[in-house]
Amino acid sequence: MTALTDPLAEGAVQAVLEAGELLADPAAVRSIRAKSETDYVTNVDLAVQEFLRERLAALAPDVQFMGEEQDNSALDLTRPCWILDPVDGTTNLIHQFQHSAISLALAEGGQIVFGVVYNPYTEECFTARRGGGAFRNGVSIQVSAVSRLADSLLSTGTVPGRRELADTAFRQMRALYDRCQDIRRTGCASLELCDVACGRLEGYVELVLQPWDYAAGMLIVAEAGGQVTAPGGAPLSLAEGGPLLASNGRLHGALQTILKE
């Protein structure tokens, strides 16, 4: 029996919207702890994760919970599981860049069946259900119809947590830049995926992401008519992270060719 019902999906979205108030408060960040030289956790990350863990447990007690700020090694991803990034774009949050999001997905049988990404600064809430389309604030969205790389706007990552990959990342960025209209970099993977889904971007490339970064966003892109894979074309893993290529579908092959150069 599926874990996803209409009341469950609606309850999850409502919980995410309420949790967004914790991000939007300019004075919310009171403590910052470095997990590495470029990776941080704040009191907001922890507060959002605990708030949503409790709300989701009340909505669906039998569904497992994967959160960025916890040990997830005991999870069985063949069983239903929430996948949460409580603050995607923590560095942006620390700098009050106002481009961070909450990303929540529900996985069943190893695939994402529901996703929600909420940007509290713009009050944009992106949602998708497998087979049911993708939406922004309840209005259907589709990927861009652009079919020429020369007409495309792309986004790439800069792998701040893996500086040894920087040469590769910037070489790929230059190769993409030479063939598109321009490049963007905003530091929030879930929102960049949603930008592909609603046609603001034609493609998005990252060398290193974790499942909670892309779980919700990849379903939203797919339900909007786009494509999300590893750069070589393999499906993305929900058990471990890796590189990602998202596109409007029309440019997927061309982008793969460039990334292989």
Image (cartoon, rainbow, N blue to C red):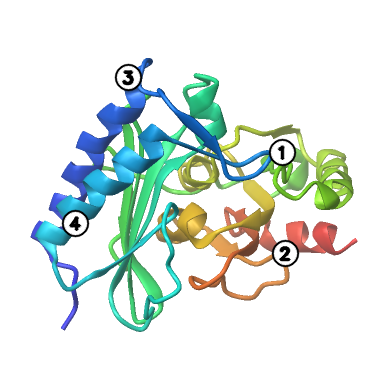
Q: Which residue is mark 3?
A: 25
Name the foreground residue: 137 vs 18.
Answer: 18
Q: Which residue is mark 2?
A: 253
* Amino acid type, label 1: Asp
Q: Which residue is mark 1?
A: 151
- For the residues marked 1 and 3, what is the alpha-carbon distance in whole angstroms? 38 Å
Packing grade of label 1 (10 A; few <14, some 14-19, many >=20) is few
Instruction: Give the residue displayed 42% in from the left and 67% down from the top.
Output: 72
Element class at badge 3? loop
Q: Earlier in the sequence, mark 4 or mark 2?
A: 4
Packing grade of label 3 (10 A; few <14, some 14-19, many >=20) is few
Q: Which residue is mark 4?
A: 56
* Amino acid type, label 3: Asp
Q: Earlier in the sequence, mark 4 or mark 3?
A: 3
* Amino acid type, label 4: Leu
Left or right of 234, for residue 134: left
